[in-house]
Amino acid sequence: MPTAQDKAADPAACGPVVPSSGHSEKKASTAALALGSIGVVYGDIGTSPLYALRESIIHSDRSTGLTEHNVTGTVSLLLWALFFIVTAKYVLFLMRADNKGEGGTLSLMALAQSAFGRRAAPIFFLGVAGAALFSGDAIITPAISVLSALEGLQVGTPLFSDYVIPLTIVVLISVFAVQRHGTAKVATFFGPVMAIFFVIIAVLGAIHIPDAPRILRAFNPFVGIAFLIDHGFIGFLVLGSVFLAVTGAEALYADMGHFGRRPIQLAWLFFVLPALTLNYLGQGALILANHAAIENPFYFLAPRWALLPLVILATAATVIACQAVITGAFSLTRQAIQLGLLPRMEIQHKSETQEGQIFIPKVNRILLIGVLLLVLMFRSSSSLASAYGIAVSGTMVVTTALAFVVVWRKWNWPLWRALAFVSFFLLVDFAFFAANLVKIIDGGWVPLMIASFTMIVMWTFVRGNTLLAEKMQRDSIPLRELIPMLEKSKPTRVPGTAIFLTNQLTSAPSALLHNIKHNKVLHEHVWLMSVRTEDTPRVPAAKRYEIEKLSPDFTTVTLHFGYMESPRIPAALALLRKSGHKFDIMTTSFFLGRRTIKASINSGMPGWQDNLFIALSKQAIDATEFFSIPSDRVVELGAQVAI
């Protein structure tokens, strides 16, 4: 399989490129990007008010009732979770740890790996764990978001109760069905819709703060701390639900490459955070003034005549939240494929100008099936809330741990300083993670099961490919030994260029040996080509290829792609021609080895893992399609390999 996983270029941090044609143009560009980030980045965290406070306060209500201490303490915890985790940790700290402008768990893993100059097993494990936990989040987010929005229909009249699940299924199927058409056009509406949503929830919250002005005591962090101390285990349970308010925080970091650091920071500090703060304060004040509002405090903020429009607006916002996490799942899957963690899948490009506009049919189907199963199993957002926090809190622990490596080795902080700084964030992350682990029986097992399965798949695929590469290396002939042998035997030469794709440029690919053995011919010019994925998001055109002439007839070519790029070989060959390397693409043939893998007794893996690796290998699409090679120029030669 001609993809590789290692050997990085320099992933030094850099910010987004800003237009340089005047101050007003910069200002307009930043404003446009900030509006776009409101639609894509903040869809998940923006819809948290639909359920976060309700689920947080319900534990203390069952224990000691809706006292002022309980309500203000819970709201205080919610606000300070936003201030500390989202603002301090992500917006002000983690967004500085970018990999060539890109963020996210795998980007941070690649950056940490480059700090060591090699693939360190603990860092690799943390990156895989973070990616696996995100897969659980990607399935739960659409289910809980759309359910919580449509449950607002029940506030108006119980007659709608029987329609919530069917409507949720219809909305979710529609969301996943439109993915194949691309999201570029729809995305232009995301920013304005979410901006209207944030303005509305801010106004609704501000209107109700005068109902109980004492709710403003929630700005005092000691009110929340006192609540935790006074309530013991109940306070611990509340802490797990409070985490629902920050479940979209990872998107701030993961989507940094799409919008840039500054627009995301400005949108959060001056628009999204104030709106969320006002809404949570308004919900708290409403509950203090009217205890019955605990049933659904978000929708009780609206006057009765505005309930249906608010449900429609909230549903639109949750669809946007779904879109953001689905797009994130596509991007993460492509990164995992490029880094060698998953088999090659069909990746469809939906934009000629934006590399990130991709659609992966197989991932889309898996997500849809998983989301629908969750809706039918849990049937309410309250039940799903128990399953929600573990995946995100676990991902945050992983992100903070990887950030420690970057701060220590990449930024060259003294060890004691890096430990002291990052440990503070890690302590809070572990507290939230532990609080969410209490929910395992009530539904927390779902994201853990999904993440565990994803990790096993990635681990098996990496381990199987390693064993396969070792076997192929043992059974191969060194290329520098083969060339003199061919010069002596003088096989029949045919005009044109033959390109053999291979992982190992030091050994003769099996397709080359089979071609000589069975067809008994050799092209005038033989190129051995290897495609390598670097630990950097994108590789500049000037560093796209390396060429080494082994003999007048044999040449090795190494193509370098970033893990955010699609490895299109024809485009790379066009770049080679522009650089003065002459060859005729119409007389060039691509030779690919198609391997049929079979399990052997001494494979080095358990039998079940052998079978899983073989099944995963069968799911991979043809190299022809993955590398965008013209099918009429391809010759495939098969072989059986036992591992």
Image (cartoon, rainbow, N blue to C red):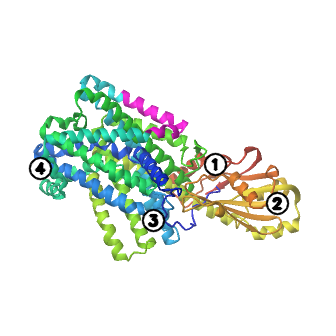
Please state which of residues 344 and 254 is positioned toward the viewer in this rendering: 254
The picture places residue 411, in percent across and down from the top left corner, at 43, 72
Residue at horizontal 18 percent and vertical 38 percent from the top: 294
The picture places residue 308, in percent across and down from the top left corner, at 30, 27
Read off the magenta span. 166-189
Q: Is residue 179 magenta?
A: yes
Q: Is residue 280 left or right of residue 446?
A: left
Q: CA distance from mark 3 to mark 2?
A: 42 Å
- Residue 395 in view of the camera: yes
Q: CA distance from mark 3 to mark 1?
A: 28 Å
Q: Pointer 4: what residue?
A: 69
Disc 3 marks a residue whose amino acid type is Ile
Regarding mark 2 in the picture, which secondary structure is present there? strand
Q: Pointer 1: what residue?
A: 626
Task: Tell me the quarter of the image containing the C terminus.
Answer: bottom right
**For marks 4 and 3 on the same chain, the one whose residue lies earlier in the sequence:** 4
Q: Residues within 10 Å of mark 2 (few under 14, many from 20)?
A: some
Q: Pointer 2: what residue?
A: 525
**For marks 3 and 1 on the same chain, the one whose residue lies earlier in the sequence:** 3
**For marks 4 and 2 on the same chain, the one whose residue lies earlier in the sequence:** 4
Regarding mark 1 in the picture, which secondary structure is present there? helix
Q: CA distance from mark 2 to mark 1?
A: 24 Å
Regarding mark 4 in the picture, which secondary structure is present there? helix
Q: Pointer 3: what residue?
A: 123
Disc 4 marks a residue whose amino acid type is His
Residue at horizontal 87 percent and vertical 68 percent from the top: 488
**Is the stretch drawn in magenta largely helix, strand or loop?**
helix
Disc 1 marks a residue whose amino acid type is Phe
